[in-house]
Image (cartoon, rainbow, N blue to C red):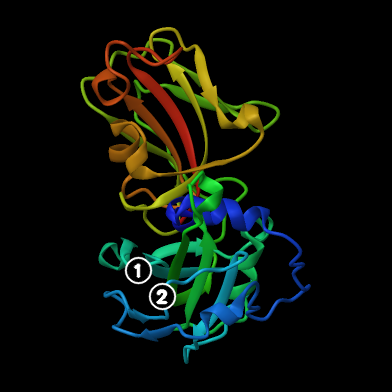
């Protein structure tokens, strides 16, 4: 999920999202915007894709409005709307150049250049679309919006490392139907195509059960991936449903490291397009205390529709 924007200095994002007057063109081509003359002194020394670039600029740096500019053009392909861009960035204090954050050591972070980015942060969207892979983009804004006593400009320089077409998200599972062994919960689609789970006669699990009901032919899920799914969950003891993305009418996406252990372990290695039945012991779910209506041993049907 757009991890870069989630950690890219909230003050900058807040100001940029509210920053005024810059209406994007229908097909933007790497647009600079804001108080760009203040970035004329900025020089970027590239140190590869795994080490932060050297930054040299006249200090103190202060801008009157959120500002973005391509300061070093790459030699790669032109980035298009709808692609997923991998990037890394370094953030510094404009007053003295002191480092605030450096993501290069953690490796490239993905950013989907889509309508969500366009509506949430037009400046970044317009600067990236039309830029070339390998470019360095500078983004500066005042931290005043976060309640600072005096305005302090923060400077972020991010490198566009690669670009590729966004992964396709399926509408429903696609693949080969698998007949599960006896003794597991049974799953049938209702007249709306939503899976319903029956736990009648099913014994409490002694270990995690991860059973394909449909075997998809897409890429295998890794623990480090973010996946897009539809799912429904019930309690094993009584079959009571406690959660369902189907009922909400929309898929959900999350990093596989950010869910209960039964999901992390049970979905690793499964393939896009699959429908997976998970029978999860309580120690791999929410423990003895449970969480809300989810208590004890749990059963899920999970449709894996996409991965990134």
Residue ID for mark 1: 96
Q: Residue at x 31, y 10 (%)?
A: 289
Residue extending furthest front?
150
Residue extending furthest left?
206
Pointer 1 with pointer 2, Cβ within 8 A: yes
Residue extending furthest bottom?
75
SS at mark 1 in the image:
loop
- Residue 27: x and y, percent? 74, 76
SS at mark 2 in the image:
loop
Category of crowding for the residue at label 2, using alpha-carbon neighbours closer than 10 angstroms: few (below 14), some (14–19), many (at least 20): few
Left or right: 144 in relation to 217: right
Q: Quadrant of residue 261?
A: top left
Q: Residue at x 30, y 82 (%)?
A: 48
Residue ID for mark 2: 59
- Residue 210: x and y, percent? 33, 35
Tell me which label, 1 or 2, sits earlier in the chain: 2
7 shown above or below 157: above
- Residue 24: x and y, percent? 74, 69
Q: Quadrant of residue 101?
A: bottom left
Depth order, front residue of 185/286: 286
- Residue 12: x and y, percent? 52, 57
245 shown above or below 137: above
Category of crowding for the residue at label 1, using alpha-carbon neighbours closer than 10 angstroms: few (below 14), some (14–19), many (at least 20): few
């Amino acid at each position: 999920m757009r991890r870069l924007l989630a950690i890219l200095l909230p003050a900058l994002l807040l100001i940029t999202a509210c920053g005024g007057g810059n209406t994007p063109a229908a097909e933007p081509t790497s647009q600079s915007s804001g108080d760009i003359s203040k970035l004329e002194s900025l020089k970027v020394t590239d140190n590869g894709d795994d080490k932060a670039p050297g930054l040299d600029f006249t200090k103190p740096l202060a801008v009157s409005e959120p500002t973005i500019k391509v300061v070093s053009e790459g030699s790669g392909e032109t980035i298009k709307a709808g692609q997923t861009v991998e990037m890394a960035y370094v953030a510094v204090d404009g007053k003295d150049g002191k480092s605030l954050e450096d993501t290069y050591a953690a490796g490239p972070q993905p950013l989907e250049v889509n309508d969500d980015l366009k509506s949430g942060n037009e400046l970044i969207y317009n600067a990236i679309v039309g830029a070339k892979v390998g470019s360095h983009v500078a983004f500066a804004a005042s931290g005043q919006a976060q309640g600072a006593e005096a305005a302090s400009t923060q400077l972020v320089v991010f490198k566009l490392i690669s670009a590729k077409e966004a992964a396709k998200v399926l509408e429903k599972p696609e693949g080969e139907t698998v007949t599960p062994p006896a003794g597991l919960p049974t799953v049938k689609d209702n007249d709306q195509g939503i899976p319903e789970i029956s736990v009648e006669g099913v014994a409490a699990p002694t270990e995690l059960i991860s059973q394909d009901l449909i075997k998809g032919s897409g890429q295998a899920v890794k623990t480090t991936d973010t996946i897009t799914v539809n799912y429904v969950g019930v309690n094993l003891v009584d079959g009571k449903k406690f959660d369902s993305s189907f009922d909400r009418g929309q898929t959900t996406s999350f990093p596989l490291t950010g869910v209960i252990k039964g999901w992390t372990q049970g979905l690793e290695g499964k393939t896009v397009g699959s429908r997976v039945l998970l029978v999860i012991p309580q120690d791999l779910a929410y423990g003895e205390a449970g969480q809300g209506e989810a208590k004890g041993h749990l059963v899920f049907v999970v449709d894996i529709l996409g991965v990134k």
